[in-house]
Amino acid sequence: MPAPRQTTDQAEFDFLMPYGPGRIWLNPAEAARCLGGCTVEHIYDLIAEGKLEYQTPTEREKRRYKITRRSVLAALAERCQFEPAEHLQRVLAVLETLTSRADLQAALQQLGAQLQKAPR
């Protein structure tokens, strides 16, 4: 997983988050508040499912998770109920910060294949 990069070109998503773009890491309680007040246990479930990026020091007796702001934004975007064509450039801007160019191209090819199969 690539290291998180702080980006300043996603201002259109800032209204979704109570924590500003200067915050790269959130603790599980903060992430839960961002995702509509879900429980911290739900955050740990999302981590286990691979839907949230995180880090936790291995040398500590108690695990303290730090969750990336961008993965919380991605989880919010996944739940959004809007017409995707209206927000394509925004979604692409987020995708570019999440992965390498090769991974992004592979993901877009996979998305294209899924869209071909989807009923219209």
Image (cartoon, rainbow, N blue to C red):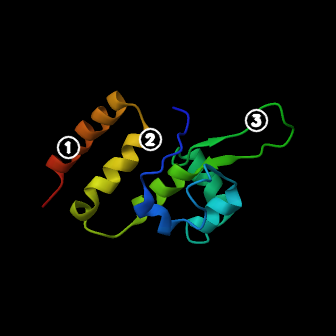
First-in-chain label (3 vs 1): 3
Label 2 belongs to which residue? 98
Q: Residues within 10 Å of mark 1 (few under 14, many from 20)?
A: few
Gap between marks 1 and 2 measured at Cα: 18 Å
First in residue order: circle 3 vs circle 2: 3
Identify which residue is drawn at 34% across, 53% down: 91
Q: Is residue 72 left or right of residue 40?
A: left
Residue flagged by tag 2: what amino acid is it? Answer: Leu
Instruction: Establish if 103 lies above or below 41.
Output: above
Question: For numbered disc 3, what is the local secondary structure?
Answer: loop
Report the Cα–Cα distance between label 3 and label 2: 22 Å
* Residue occupying the far front of the picture: 8
Element type at mark 1: helix
Q: Amino acid at mark 3?
A: Pro
Image marks 3 and 1: residues in contact by CB distance under 8 Å? no
Image: 87 above or below 105: below
Q: Are marks 3 and 2 in contact (CB under 8 Å)?
A: no
Q: Which residue is mark 1?
A: 112
Whole-percent x, y for residue 120 in the image = 12, 61
What numbered label is drawn on residue 57?
3
Residue at 29% x, 32% y: name it: 106
Q: Dot 2: within a 10 Å radius of its alpha carbon, few (fewer than 14), some, or many (20 or more) residues?
A: many
Q: Nearer the viewer, residue 79 or 85?
A: 85
**118 up-or-down from 38: above or below:** above
